[in-house]
Amino acid sequence: MTDHNHRQTTAAITLLAFACGVAVGNVYFPQAIGPLVAAGLGVSPDSAATVVTATQFGYAAGIFLLVPLGDRIRPRRLLVTLLTLTGLGLLAASTAQTLLPLTAASALVGATTVIAPLAGPLAAGLVPAERSGTVSGTLLSGCLAGMLLSRAVGGALGDWMGWRAPYVLAAALSLTVAALLARLLPASPPAAAASYPALLAAPLRLLRTEPELRRSCLNQATVFAAFSAVWTAVALLLTGPAYGMSARATGLLALVNAATMLCTPVAGRLVDRRGPDRINLMCFAVVGVSAPVLAFGGLGGVPGLTALVAGTLLLDVGMQCGMVANQVRIYGIDARARSRLNTAYMTCAYLGGTVGSWLGAHAYGRFGWTGVCVLVAALTGVAPARRLSGRFRSFPARPAPASSKRAGWSPS
């Protein structure tokens, strides 16, 4: 690769990482302003949490219905169109007078802001296979920047100007990025000429035929469910009687976690060197440890805040690094079907996140913060338990001597 081509590739990946951050932020800033939405529309906090659930459900639906088009439609055209629709949906959400139209607009925003799962396969095709982990880590850093900073900015702006202001800002950013991509992203041809029904059927077929894909989907769906449960419920905790803080506090907690963005490029390099299995094993351990640490957050005061900071840092690092490992695993299955593989993977991941948000809000309402932490521990154990039970079932009654030399188990 010449220096000129290398610079072009680096610039394209940087722009895609920025686009990922803006798009992913649209899914997460509603978590920080849920209490403001409840007060502004005169509904309960549990009801306002449906905005977050609708956005994540829309995101999962958009991944399934729209991301396969990345293998058929020119990527630049598709990305620009989706971001433009996202901007219009955010403007519609900012004008909602009741919860129902806000929920509907949020589902539309979620469905169209699926830039990250489209950008991943596109970026992976721009570099050699041995750099795929590094590139995935770079894009994920952009996603995490959007995820964390959007909560901080959304919470602060919502406290200052009301819950509608974050939607207006997000709309402006989405439309600006659409214009930048239209002008600066290099044109590239689609990878497949299959019909749309065939593209929709492909992720389901791949889930049925590819065990490594199913493995990665279960890994990320359960961990992301735990992650979403915590970040949906923590806004209720911080604005509730234990702390009595404003919505800005949730954003500031997310801003502290911005340091975890530095972990994903490192995780990408580790995956390139050591493979995804070991990284997944470490991620399950880190997320599992976060549950008892987070439980002390219910104490309130400085000790509780310290526990929340430490616990969410552990949770974020585990979720993010696991995402890198799982994506590298699925990209290695078939380079010609990366968008379809990513469709199956990200759909499962965000369905897990949707369920986690719903469970987190309801666990908090019924059992308090302790119930949310128990939920995190239970969700984290699902994939390792499934992997372990499969290994036990696969053992013969009288194992041959060679079976004792099998490679060690990895719950990834």
Image (cartoon, rainbow, N blue to C red):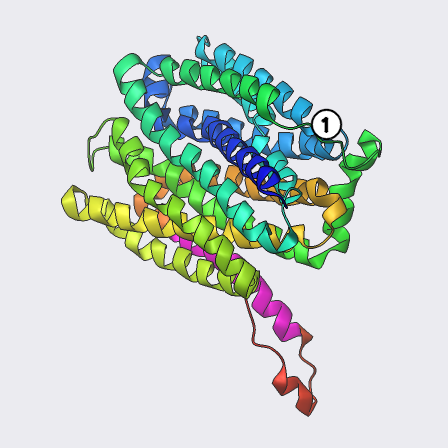
- Residue 143, horizontal then vertical, whole percent: 48, 37
Crowd around label 1: few <14 · some 14–19 · many ≥20 (10 Å)? some
Q: Quadrant of residue 400?
A: bottom right
Residue at (65, 38) in percent of width and height: 122
Report the side of 328 relative to 151 (left or right): right
- Residue 277, horizontal then vertical, whole percent: 56, 64
| Magenta stretch, overall SS | helix
Q: Nearer the viewer, residue 116 or 388?
A: 116
Q: Is residue 22 above or below residue 130?
A: above
Res 341 seen here:
yes
Report the side of 78 relative to 302 (left or right): right
Q: Secondary structure at mark 1?
A: loop
Residue at (68, 22) in percent of width and height: 77
Q: Nearer the viewer, residue 276 or 403?
A: 276
Q: For the view shown, which residue lies furthest in the bottom direction?
A: 401
Residue under pointer 1 = 74
- Residue 352, horizontal then vertical, whole percent: 54, 43
Q: Is residue 177 above or below residue 15?
A: above
Q: Is residue 412 above or below residue 348?
A: below
Residue 389 counted in the magenta span: yes
Residue 276 counted in the magenta span: no
Q: Quadrant of residue 346?
A: top right
Magenta stretch bounds: 374-393
Residue at (31, 19) in percent of width and height: 157
Specify the quadrant that holds the C terminus: bottom right
Q: For the view shown, which residue lies furthest in the front direction?
A: 3
**Three-letter amino acid code at disc 1?**
Arg
Report the side of 31 relative to 118 (left or right): left
- Residue 141, horizontal then vertical, whole percent: 45, 41
